[in-house]
Amino acid sequence: MGTTSAMSLEDALALHRAGRLDEAEAAYRSLLAVHPGHADLLRFFGLLRHQQGRADEAIDLLERAVVLCPDSADGRRTLALLLDKRGDRDGALSHYRAAAGLAPHDAGVLNDFGCALMEAGHLHDAAGVLEGAAMVAPEHGHALANLATVLNRLGRTGEALAFAERAAAVRPDHAATYTTLSIALASAGLVGRAVDAARRAAAIEPADASALVQLGNVLIDAGDPDAAVHAYDRALERQPDHRGATENRLYALHLSPTVGDRDLAAQLRIWGAGMSSLSEPRPDRGRDPDRRLRIGYVSADFGRHPVGWFLSPVLPNHDRATVEVHAYSGRVVEDEVTDHLRRHCDSWFSTLGMDDAALAGRIRADGIDLLVDLSGHTAHNHLGVFARTPAPVLATWGGLIGTSGLPAMDWLIGDPRQCPAGAEELHTERIVRLPGGYVPYGPPAYAPAVAPLPALGSGHVTFGCFNRLAKVRDGVIALWAGVLDAVPGSRLFLNTRELRCPDLRRTVAARFAQAGIDADRLELGQGGGHADMLAAYAGVDIALDPFPYSGGLTTLEALWMGVPVVTLPGRRFCSRHSLSHVTVLGHPEWAAADADGYVRIAAALSRDREALARLRAGLRNRMADSPLCDGAGFTRGLEAAYRMMWRRHCSS
């Protein structure tokens, strides 16, 4: 273009930048009439049409620009951005990749490509690209923060924290950067600093709902679910449709001792009713009640996680003559448990980078008959998929903590202890009660041998709890103080990742001191790796279960390590996990009817140390021979439940 045309283009750009879009459009059209093959002009006009809400026309203009000038990194990057916004992730990645190849030393281009890879679930590739951006531009705050995010998701906690701290130093007044720092600090167990970073993010940008959601998350880690609920409420005031705030709030309500069981159920029903608008016609998969069923399992927890340990005995024992097993996995960091589960599936599909609508479409296309939710209201759930009714029959099992609240969810799989008579009022689903426990347990091969009773060597009884700190509220501490008073000389050992934080250790010690438990009777462990945590049961004589959210996998692990568990069940589903486990094991007497009974049971177990030592020595073998570890027997019962659900569907 000549000088006059260039000036005209500058005038058009000036109008565009000033927000005078109609005038800029007229200028661009006039220029294009003279220069229809000018790539930059097409690109700028495409951006304008995007701003005007004409997405298809914008992409057409940008694609024409890329055809004319395929070596323009800016053109590729802009097209990728708009394709990403439209939901064409594969197309976007193709152009982001091309832009990065054309501008390998442009940190902004690399940052965009890395973010796109991260959102698509290609975390290892994203880490490599973002590391390149950080090397090219060590002060690029966006790239540093995004690199911290992806490294954290990959479990590279120390590296993530280092990059998050660098990002915060570069951008000290940026709310999102401090939210990222808070996430990295929490993953490192530095909960006190994580709370401070989240509060700073919320102060920098008071309208930022994400900062308040992260504050709620770390307040749960700090052991204060009620304060977390307040933070989530503040986030929802700013952004009523914020999914993270809504779902994390529901999880926090399960932890709260101040929320009644009926109130909790009502809150879940309200949430579920709000999801009803997503419902679609259920697919017709025929009405043959006896044919082979296509079972779909949906979870982000196919690995070293409670769901992984519960599924490990089930998937190998499914009868392939009657069921076909399909897994929809959102697992980010895979491990040997993931590999074990994958080997026993007919198909395995990664859901990383997919939203609920896309995943529901995939499940519908796969022809699943019965879809099983394994998350409930826990992290990374896909309840939005179930709300879209992509299969004829929907059930929740295994990873749930209570009712889904979804009118679309047909069944909840429990057992007579988890869901006693009368529990129906707390659930939106129909309840199927398996005859044994509601889950089996597949213990890890690396679990150490059961250690001798520590009280025989130490001369005092050590009670212990390895549950997360959010379950240990003031009422729990008061009851545990009563247990220690009833057993002179006894001590209490808490062991959880959150106690890596020095500030939190001091706070916890002060809370116990207020309840009359001096520091010399309290030991605060810092969690550690899974094998280390199991080995730490060598220092525990009797485990004390918290309430109203009891231990699930934690209780099974204590029992496997030879440690009896005293529990106080309530009415809500999540308060009855331990009741189910100890009853199926054959020790219903470890479940108390009230607080006084809890103290009496703990004290009685501690009195006869020789009997306690014999119990400990034989508990693992008894558990291995019990229904808790009978994967084949459990799976036959589960399949019978699936068949009943399908037949009910066929006859409805």
Image (cartoon, rainbow, N blue to C red):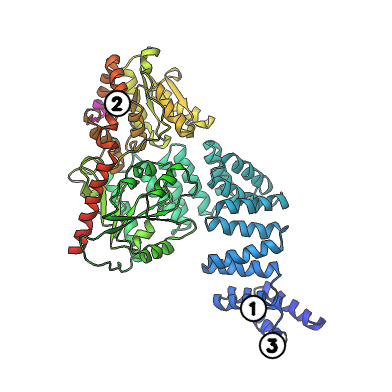
Q: Are marks 3 and 1 in contact (CB under 8 Å)?
A: no
Callout 1–callout 2 Cβ contact below 8 Å: no
Task: Pinpoint residue 455: horizontal percent, then vertical percent.
Answer: 36, 16
**Structural crowding at the residue carrying mark 2, measured as other residues with C-alpha within 10 Å and reported as few (<14), some (14–19) or many (≥20):** many
Residue with the mark numbered 1: 64
Other residues around mark 1 within 10 Å, as few (<14) / some (14–19) / many (≥20): some
Q: Which residue is mark 2?
A: 619
Residue 391 screen position, x and y as percent: 31, 62
Q: Which residue is mark 3?
A: 33
What is the spatial separation of the Cα atoms under label 3 and label 2, in whole angstroms?
85 Å
Q: Which residues are magenta?
A: 591-597
| Three-letter code for the amino acid on which mark 2 is drawn | Leu
Q: Secondary structure at mark 2?
A: helix
- What residue appears at the point 59 percent right and 53 percent down from the top-left corner? 125
Q: Residue furthest front?
A: 321
Nearer the observer: mark 3 or 1; the answer is: 1
Q: Nearer the viewer, mark 1 or mark 2?
A: 2
Q: Is residue 348 magenta?
A: no
Quarter holding residue 630: top left
Whether residue 594 appears in magenta in the rendering, the answer is yes
On screen, residue 273 above or below 470: below
Q: Mark 3 or mark 2, which is nearer to you?
A: 2
